[in-house]
Image (cartoon, rainbow, N blue to C red):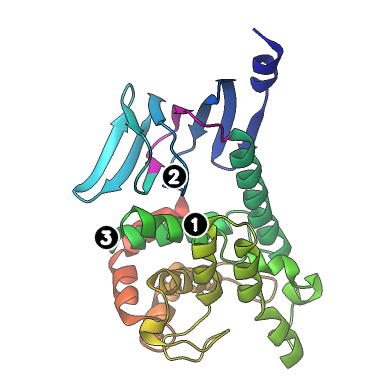
Amino acid sequence: MDKINERNFIETVHMKGLQISLIASGDGTEIIYHKLDPDTRWVLYPTEGWKALEYVYVLSGQLRYPTSEGFKTLKTGDSFHESPVSEHYLFQATETTEFLYVTSQPVFHHYSKATKELMELAVSIEEKDGYTVDHCGRINKISMIIGEELGFDSKQLLRLNMASFLHDIGKVKIPLSILQKPGKLTAEEWNIMKKHTTYGKEMLEQTGNPVLIESGHIVEQHHERYDGKGYPKGLKGKEISIEASIISIVDSFDAITTDRVYQKGRSVEEGFQEILHCRGTMYNPDIVDIFLKNKERIIKGEKE
């Protein structure tokens, strides 16, 4: 084994739900090992100027992905390839899943560095804001349930997946004294707090990644209200993206039912009642109906 490949074998990235390792490379081709925890998602999507052959081989477990004809599943020993990828593919591990990803153009260093930085940043938001370490995961899991129920295609699910996990990323720019204040915020402090949605959009725009830029628009809107009384722009009704409307409901539900520095969490049933009470004022009524229709799946997702 030459020195380059020997070095590549130990370049491993660990993050919540995902492990990736560059196990071999040469002449521009890379073979990358992936291990996904149950319900973790992984994506392939077209990029301008990208002409690579991309190949996935499932070593163990299952990968589920939506198509125009419904969901398809790759099981152990199954493979998938495109050259180049011409549409969005969002794969979900239905159990602990291992697979090899082979690409004819090098991606590992940029891919692993960008993913690790974003995920660590999102986790730092949870810890800074006083939520449990599972907050972003809960928002993501329940939002994806609603997106799938609405029949989102892979591109919509990808945007929702990223935006729901990174919805509060802008809070890194909010002072800790405001984020963790146990009492009511002053008018000045509240105005500073409200800036986190726009900060989040700007931070995702700065990545230069088209998917994250699109997700940034959703992040900026997740505190808008159906009646136009939200922030930062006072959008109302259909002016608010459907993805942001989903995150708004799920984020509120989690805030209601989770212990925070300024309030004790209420019961899950009280959370559902509060969402119903605000149907058509704070929240898109059609999305509320889908949310309540899926109470059992949501409760199950909360416990997992």
**On the rendered structure, is 125 left or right of 256?**
right
The residue shown at (64%, 69%) is 202
The residue shown at (49%, 64%) is 214
Mark pair 2, 1: CA separation: 11 Å
In what element is the residue under mark 3? loop
Q: Quadrant of the N terminus?
A: top right
Front position in the image: 119 or 296: 119
- The answer to whether residue 61 shows anywhere in this view is yes
Q: Tell me whether circle 2 and circle 1 mark residues in contact (CB < 8 Å).
A: yes
Mark 1 against mark 3, which lies toward the viewer? Answer: 1
Residue neighbourhood size for the residue with mark 3, other residues' Cα within 10 Å, grouped as few (<14), some (14–19), many (≥20) = few
**On the rendered structure, is 71 left or right of 49?**
left
**On the rendered structure, is 269 left or right of 80?**
right
The residue shown at (34%, 57%) is 297
Which of the marked residues, 1 or 3, is nearer the chain's N terminus?
A: 3
Q: Residue at label 1?
A: 211
Q: Residue at label 2?
A: 43
Disc 1 marks a residue whose amino acid type is: Val
Residue 5 drawn above or below residue 138: above
Disc 2 marks a residue whose amino acid type is: Val
Q: Which residues are magenta?
A: 91-107
Checking the image for residue 151, the label placed there is 3
